[in-house]
Image: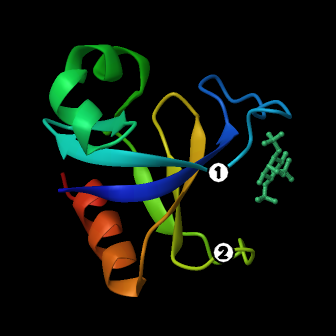
């Protein structure tokens, strides 16, 4: 699965709250492959900078959990991703169908 999503970092790996200045929403072209979620700057980056991107912006999906972020009301179609290393991210998708599709894909990889 792949596509554009918005991401917000809430809790960094290790469980500490993401510091102010790094909590903003940012757009990524996301691909899910071999149990790893790769966050690329855009589709172009997906093709050209795969290694760089994968080293710097990859989230291992093993023992991750994606749930609808019903408590986050500032944006629509948002899910929360809890990772095995205790990080927490919010991802905004384009519509409710995409939201469910990302959640199902992540939870059943
Ligand atoms: C953050 C940015 C986020 C905001 C976050 C800010 O600032 O404005 O959009 O989250 O609020 O800290 P920065 O880009 O300087 O990190 P929301 O969009 O959810 O309000 P927060 O600290 O309450 O998460």
Q: Which of the labelled discs sits on residue 68, or is there none?
A: none
* Drawn side of residue 79 relative to residue 108, left or right: right
x, y percent for residue 45: 28, 31
The residue depicted at 35 percent of the width and 36 percent of the height is: 40
x and y percentages locating residue 108 in the rendered image: 21, 58
Q: Is residue 62 visible?
A: no
Coloring scheme used: rainbow
Residue drawn at the location 34% of the way across and 15% of the way down = 55
Residue 26 place in picture, x, y as percent: 58, 47
In this figure, which residue is indicated by the disc labeled 2?
A: 75
Label 2, ligand 1: CB separation under 8 Å = yes
Residue 61 location, x and y as percent?
A: 32, 39
Q: Which residue is mark 1?
A: 25
**Relative height, residue 5 to residue 88 (above, below):** below
Residue toward you, 45 or 90: 45
Left-right relation of 14 to 102: right
Q: Which residue is situated farthest in the bottom direction here?
A: 96
Pick the quarter of the image with the N terminus.
bottom left
Please tell me which residue is depicted at 63% across the width and 78% down the height of the picture.
Answer: 70
Give 105 or 42, whichever is nearer the viewer. Answer: 42
Q: Is residue 47 left or right of residue 69?
A: left
Q: Are marks 1 and 2 in contact (CB under 8 Å)?
A: yes
Decide: few, some or many residues near mark 2? Use Cα within 10 Å; few <14, some 14-19, many ≥20: few
Q: Is residue 69 visible?
A: yes
């Amino acid at each position: 699965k792949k596509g554009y999503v918005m991401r917000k970092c809430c809790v960094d790996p290790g469980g500490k709250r993401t510091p102010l200045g790094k909590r903003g929403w940012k757009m990524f072209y996301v691909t899910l492959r071999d149990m790893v979620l790769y966050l690329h700057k855009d589709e172009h980056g997906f093709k050209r900078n795969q290694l760089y991107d994968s080293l710097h912006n990859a989230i291992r999906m093993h023992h991750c959990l994606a749930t609808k972020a019903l408590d986050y009301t500032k944006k629509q179609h948002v899910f929360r991703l809890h990772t095995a290393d205790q990080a927490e991210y919010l991802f905004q998708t384009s519509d409710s169908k995409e939201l469910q599709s990302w959640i199902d894909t992540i939870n059943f990889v």
